[in-house]
Amino acid sequence: MEAAVQNLVIVANNSKSGAAELAAEFAARAEAAGVATRVESAYPIPEGIFKGVDACCVIGGDGTLLSVAAEAAREGTRVFGVNMGKLGFLAMFTVDEARAFFDRFLGGDFRISDRSLVECRSASGSVFCALNDIVVRSTTSRVARMRVEADGKLVNVYVADGLVISTPTGSTAYNLSAGGPLIHPRAPVLAMTPICPHTLSNRGLIVGEGTRLALNIDSPGSPVAVTCDGKACFQDEPESGMPVEVVLAPKRLQLVLRPGYTYFKLLHTKLGWSGNHLQQ
């Protein structure tokens, strides 16, 4: 059991059919239960939206949940995700499940999964956090050149289309498509996976909690972009010679789990793993 919800923000992606109606229904139910409630549909979400708020209900999909993750983690706001999209790795509840579970959620009858975030910081002091990944990628058809150090020691100079630095939560996203490993959410690690590396022996690498990665982009003929959960960042930085420091963030996201959730069951469902041969 968790603490009952006292202050709730409902973030609705109104581009999804039925999201506004479901948000209104949940707001009425929460207010009837004596919970201070606010509905927000602006994107991007207003800064400080979760200050003093102990829970958030996200209605949309994984992308909508990613858009609130950093702010929710910073304020310690628990996140209940309702999936109206396609994947549902993060927004775990179907609409019907959410309707059936909502009163239990308000009463604190749920489990939490603490999810790591990855933080990147530029030399100028700009800081961004991501729940899934930070991606450094060439913006042209040419490869990028990236020197990576861990705690001041050279790891490698990658010549590749780009580099994905993923949390365990993000290991099922771009990292997986790039050939990186699946990582259990409780593992305090980051995965660093090159995208189409020029040298085939350049494989993915997992680094532990406390490791400080330093990325220096040395690609004067191939501009790069840095994205955090798909959103561009460091717009004011030079395209080459741009040092970026990457670490596991000190704050974690508190993600509400659906009843009966296990990580491996999620993989079976979302990735189509059958496991039938294990039951024979």
Image (cartoon, helix red, strand yellow):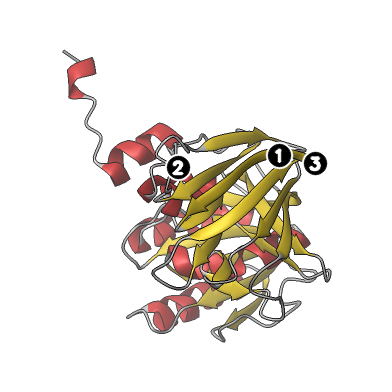
**Quadrant containing the C terminus in the rendered view:** top left
How busy is the neighbourhood of tag 3: few (under 14 within 10 Å), some, or many (20 plus)?
few
Horizontal and vertical percent position of residue 216: 69, 57
Q: Which mark is residue 259?
A: 2
Q: Residue 220, which numbered label?
A: none
Looking at the picture, tell me which residue is in the foreground, 10 or 209. 209
Q: Secondary structure at mark 1?
A: strand
- Using the image, determine if residue 10 lies above or below residue 105: below
**Mark 3 / mark 2, whichever is N-terminal:** 3
Q: Is 254 above or below relative to 34?
A: above
Q: Quadrant of residue 130?
A: bottom right
Spot occupied by residue 200 in the image (x, y as percentages of width and height):
39, 39
- Residue 55's quadrant in the figure? bottom right
Which residue extends farthest bottom? 42
Q: Residue at x 83, y 68 (%)?
A: 125
Badge 1 density bin: few <14, some 14–19, many ≥20, Cα 10 Å = few
Tell which of 93 and 275 is nearer to you: 275
Mark pair 3, 2: CA separation: 44 Å
